[in-house]
Each structure stands twice: as structure tokens, then as C-alpha cells.
Image: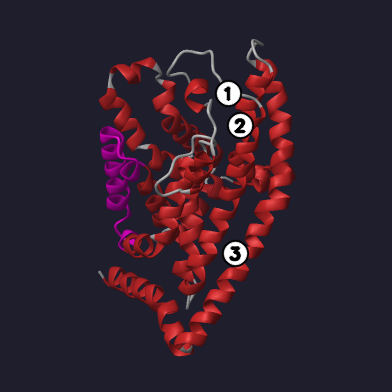
Amino acid sequence: MIVFFVLSGLVVTLPALRRRGFDWVAYFPRRVVRLMVPVFASAALAAVWVVAIPQRSTQPDGTWLTASSTPGFSWEYLVKAWDLLGGDGQINNPLWSLRWELIFSLALPVFAVTAIPARTRWVGGLAAACALSWLGARTGSGALEYLPAFFVGAVLAVRLDAVRTVADRINARWFRQPLWALFTVASLLLLIAPWLFGPGVADRPELGSVLRGLAPLAAAGLVVAALGWRPLAALLESRPSQFAGRISFSLYLVHVPIVIFSVYLFPGQVWYVPLLFALPVAALVAVEFTWLVESRSHRWSKAVGVWASERYRAWFGCEASEDLAEGVSRDARQRALTSADR
């Protein structure tokens, strides 16, 4: 998930920094609609799976199934799932990550402006992000642990030209393939290190916190590899990968309630029986969810953004609208010039 946080920080920040006159009035409602429509729909769908079969786990307390089951469903669970900022995702636990996505989206001007000095001080920016992630992991603060990953993505956005330049230089060398392979594998191993070490990390919580603190850096390494390593980029641009990418967000939102439903549909069966049922069902539901909900949320978000921008222009005048739309971008460019002069 940290990889997607970094990637989101990159792709959401980039237009705000590079597009002159970025329309912030349109951005905020557009982004909220883009995120919340799939959230509302996935939570409602999760409620259907929850009420279809009573979820009374026979596994011990503390297991994933017991913690993720909802034995006594009521409408309050649905409202809590819709409340990304203060609720919980008991009926659809992947929604936990959308909380940080929404907070980042609303705070994008802060992330964008803060990332500008990292154009020339990127080492310090990445180190600060990892330090905050470590602090969040050590103290149990979700905001400190996860939001720095979006900042790392924003740093990649301001350094994207430099990243591509370095990638081109590497690709001109004879050792480019083994170097990229080593870099990618090292990034992947660092990302999964907290789970790779298993019980050893549980025995040494300070080690687990350090490894989780380095996760944004590892995720950024994978994003850089996808941008610079041509065989990996070709793989990601293939039709199967593109299809998987199109449905990935929907699949992420719908898969857990289906897995839990499948476990209760086949009680007492070995673990792979419900899994063999859940995987194709989740894939089919994700395809339909992409077409029915996610694609429409794209169109609705654009329409809402246009409407908000037009309303602002009508109420406050075109000149005021342009001032607001260019405010953060102008400040960002000013900081960039100042950093370059230094």
C-alpha cells in the first residue's frame, strides 16, 4: 500500500506544479467526488456481503478473520465506513488507506509547496520523511507513519526530470540490466522487510519501527525502477498489466468482504477452497465495479470540478478566480527559482 501512497503523491502533485494556472477551485471538489463515490459504493456493497451470511467466527480472538468479521451488523457500520476522517472500516477494512488518501488530497497545497525546497535538498527531504514514518511506527501514529509517503511522492514529482536524466545515463551503460535488477530487488526486499523477518521483528520492536520507517524510501525505489528500467516499464505497459491497473482500485475496494463471505460460505473447508471461490468472484465484481462506479466517478468528478469553477467565477469574478487558481502554483514557482538561485 505504501507504493500506492508514493505513486499517488507523484501523480496528484505533478499537475499542480507543472500546469500554469492550475485550477484549485475545481481540484478540491473534483478530488473529493473521485474518492468518495467509490467509497460509498464499496461500503454499500460490503454491507450486502456482510448480511448475506452471519459472520460468527470460530477462530481465536486476535486472528484476522475474527477481527474483520461483523457478527452483529447494523446501519451504523455503514455510516462509519462512509466517514473516512472519523469512522472505521469494520465492514470493509481496505477503506483505512482512503483516509490518508483523502487527507493528502485536501492538504495538497501544503505538500506541493513543502516539496519545492526538496528540488535541491532532496536527500534531506527524504530523510525527514523516513524519520517521521519511523516516529509514527514507533508511537502508533498513523498520520506520521503514512502521510510522509505522499510527501516522498511529491519529492519525486519535483525531481522527476532529474530522475529521468539519471535513468537515461544508467540505460546508456553496459551494466544497466543487472544494476536495475539489483536496485529493484533491493527496494522490494526493503519494503517487505518487516514481514520478511517475521517473529524476529516482533521480538525487537525498535527494528520493526526502523524498517517501517524506511518503507516510503523503498516504495519510491520501486516507482523509480518502473520509470527507468525499460523491461519493467514494458511489462507494466503490456495489455494484461494495463487491464490489471484499470481494475486494481476497484479490486482493492471490493475484495476483502468477498473473501470473508467465502470463508463463511464454505465453513470448515481447507483454506484454499474459499480462496478458489473468492478470487474469480472478486475479479468479476471488480470489473463490474470499475464500469459501473469508478468510471462514472471520473466523469462526475470532472463535471463537479467544472461546475465549481464556473460558480466561483460567476460569484467572485474571473480575475479573482484566476488569482486563486494560480496562487499556489505561483508560490511554488517562486520557491523553485529561489532554490535554483541558491
Above or below 66: residue 17: below
Residue sitting nearer the eye, 202 or 308: 308
User: Which of pointers 3 and 1 indicates the residue nearer the eye?
Assistant: 1
Tell me the residue that label 1 is attached to.
55
> Is residue 78 in view from this perspective?
yes
Q: Is residue 225 left or right of residue 257?
A: left
Q: Which residues are magenta?
A: 117-145
Q: Residue shown at 50%/43% (left/top)? A: 81
Residue 27 at x, y percent in the picture: 50, 68
The disc labelled 3 sits on which kind of residue? Ser
Secondary structure beneath label 1: loop
Q: Which secondary structure class fits the magenta region best?
A: helix
Neighbourhood count class around disc 2 (C-alpha, 10 Å): few under 14, some 14–19, many 20 upward: many
Q: Quadrant of residue 30?
A: bottom right
> Is residue 231 in view from this perspective?
no
Q: Are marks 1 and 2 in contact (CB under 8 Å)?
A: yes
Tell me the residue that label 2 is attached to.
50
Q: Which image quadrant: the C terminus?
A: bottom left
Q: Residue shown at 68%/20% (left/top)? A: 265
Residue 163 at x, y percent in the picture: 46, 54
Residue 290 at x, y percent in the picture: 69, 49
Q: CA distance from mark 3 to mark 1?
A: 35 Å
Q: CA distance from mark 2 to mark 3?
A: 29 Å
The disc labelled 1 sits on which kind of residue? Gln
Tell me the residue that label 3 is attached to.
301
Q: Are marks 3 and 1 in contact (CB under 8 Å)?
A: no
Secondary structure beneath label 2: helix
Q: Quadrant of residue 325?
A: bottom left
Q: Earlier in the sequence, mark 3 or mark 1?
A: 1
Q: Residue shown at 38%/60% (left/top)? A: 107
Picture colour scheme: secondary structure
Residue sitting nearer the eye, 270 or 265: 265
